[in-house]
Image (cartoon, rainbow, N blue to C red):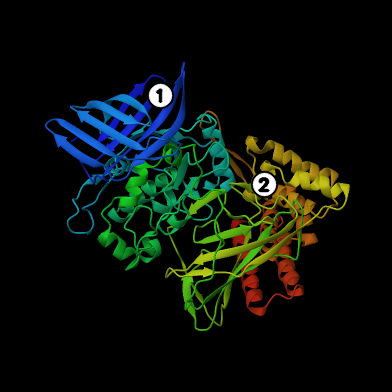
Amino acid sequence: MISGLYEGQDGDSRLVLRVDVDGTRPTGRVSGDLFAVAGATTSYAGSFVVDAPTVRAEGDEVRIQGRGVFSFDTPVKDVSVTITDGSGTAVLAGRTFQVSFASPYFRRVLLEQDSVTGSVPFVSYHTGALPGPGGTPARELSVTAAYAEAGIELTVAEPGVIPVDGSGADLAWDDAELHHAMTQQFSMFGDAPAWRLWLLVASKHVGGYRGIMFDYNDAHQRQGSAVFYDAIKGDTPQAQRAQLRTYVHELGHAFNLLHSWQKNLATPPQPLGPDGGFGDLSWMNYVQNFRPGGEHGYWAAFPFQFTDPELVHLRHGFFRDVAMGANAFGTGAAEIDPFEQPVEDHSGLRLELRAKESFELGEPVVVELKLSCAGEPHTTHGHLHPDTEFTQVSITQPGGRTVLYRPMMRHCVDDSPEIRLDDGNPAMYRSAYIGHGRDGHYFQQPGEYHVRAQYIAADGSRIVSPACLVRVRYPVSFDDHRVAELMLGEEQGKLFSLLGSDAPALRSGNLALDEMIDRYGGHPLAVYARLVKGLNAEREFKALTPGKRLSVRPADPKQGIEHLTRVARDAAIDNITLNMVMRRLARAQARQGDLQKANAVMDQMVTLFQTKGVNPIVMGQIRRQAELTKAALSAED
């Protein structure tokens, strides 16, 4: 048994070597990372992997040789490793390293875990507690044990408990609050890649998600995740099993593992597994989407382990592709091919993208997605928004470069409610802000953009929309130029994505939006600044303090009403967002103590959309929304 982690140094070059040729689930590879040492500092230099080495044993000596793939240019591609009794030599890239055995694990990672008061962290699950696949040993699995089986040593720091200041606070988290918690926590991590990540155990997410990965377009890539206790809590074997899978799944994203059906979006692209990836027996698949057999079929066959390709990535992926704080998740801003229509499509579904005729430079680009049935009634899932991983959006820029839109937060939707599309409900609609994401602003110059979407249906069908033309106009006046500058700041883009935030890290963005309202309040784009400021004021805001206490800023319904009333009056935004604004405005009126005005706002919403000529089926849905909102606000009152 020689597999494991070895370390050595040759002058100013340090080697971290991974030998994986025997032991548990060997992948038959050797890989390593090189670091340059200068005085008291160490910098990453490059990585390599030998995918199919020859292995020869002579007595106590094992020789491993093969052709390496390097992340850097080197004229010498051959790699040779000789191991005897836990030490040996490694010859690569023209250097010879004396190496010594350091660990039976291939990588070592520090996990910091904090839980909000009332949220109980998961401990372990016995895989024999419920029926499973034959031939798989029953064992007690914690999160650390699951990763240990993959060759990753997770060391858990002393778990922390985050107390809540004040009583009666709404402990449902939204993306803006999670972003603030992330920036607060990661400010202590530093900007360099490191084998260190953070897991937040929170109460619940406003969207009902089980987990979320924090991703970002700066130095804080893939440094942590959150799981939501209320969505997975319970002491039954089923609940404990679900908790184990959720924790391992979310942390898997931090190691740069994509969902099973998205591996073709990796860099470099990876082949999809059976049934377009939905047939993978992996921690990274969605239970309810597994084929064949859905949830029952998944648990009946799942051996509680990563797939072989995922194991190769975890153990032998290049340093910057795996280490937290390094390369972006998945494709990043690299060019992709525009989504193409399938050669044959018998899905019975049709996907459309719609946008307004043109946008001013700096205006938030919002598109409407419409999924409809083309013929017979059809049942599928309702995850049409591109922040839920089942819908992707590609953007072809004026220069011809095509990039993938990547939202700031990756929501894991382990529940897929069925939506039936028929004569009574012929289509579903979603509004998506795609102007900014983890790669920054996507529409930073005037010109014509071609936007396509791809929706992965419940049966795995990949439905591709025709291209939607998005025109961005040139600024005309001096005010147009100044407004565009104020709107295209990086922090402003994050505020549009998050619909406002109190985070100190976004203070400059908030000041820019204040300037928009104060100095350019009559400009057409000021409505978006009012939208963000109004929505943020209308809600409570949870903030994680440097001392790791949770403080809750109460809602400011007065300021929310001031901004949202103007947004609703101008009615210059898309219909789906306007609907949400008017319901939030009604909630602010009710919180202000005026239920009569709140009900009046809902009546105005119905009248407004009638005037807009909304189709009768959608109009019926809007009326139901208005009545349900009235009832909910009355009950709260």
Q: Quadrant of the C terminus?
A: bottom right
Q: Earlier in the sequence, mark 1 or mark 2?
A: 1
Residue at (35% x, 40% y) in the render: 68
In the rendered image, residue 413, in percent from the top left (x then y), is placed at 46, 57
Q: Secondary structure at mark 1?
A: strand
Mark 2, residues whose alpha carbon is within 10 Å: few (<14), some, or many (≥20)?
many
Q: 406 or 28: which is nearer to us?
A: 28
Q: Quadrant of the N terminus?
A: top left
Residue at (45% x, 57% y) in the render: 264
Using the rendered view, name the quadrant where residue 430 is placed.
bottom right
Residue at numbered disc 2: 493
- Closer to viewer: mark 1 or mark 2: 1
Residue 115 visible (yes or no):
no
- Give the left or right position of residue 302, taking residue 389 as reference: left
Residue 289 visible (yes or no):
yes
Q: Mark 2: which amino acid?
A: Gly
Q: 129 or 384: which is nearer to us?
A: 384
Q: Secondary structure at mark 2?
A: helix
In the rendered image, residue 245, in percent from the top left (x then y), is placed at 35, 51
Mark 1, residues whose alpha carbon is within 10 Å: few (<14), some, or many (≥20)?
some
Q: Mark 1: which amino acid?
A: Ser
- Give the left or right position of residue 472, taking residue 468 as reference: right
- Give the left or right position of residue 501, taking residue 418 as reference: right
The numbered disc on residue 13 is 1
In the rendered image, residue 600, in percent from the top left (x then y), is placed at 73, 64
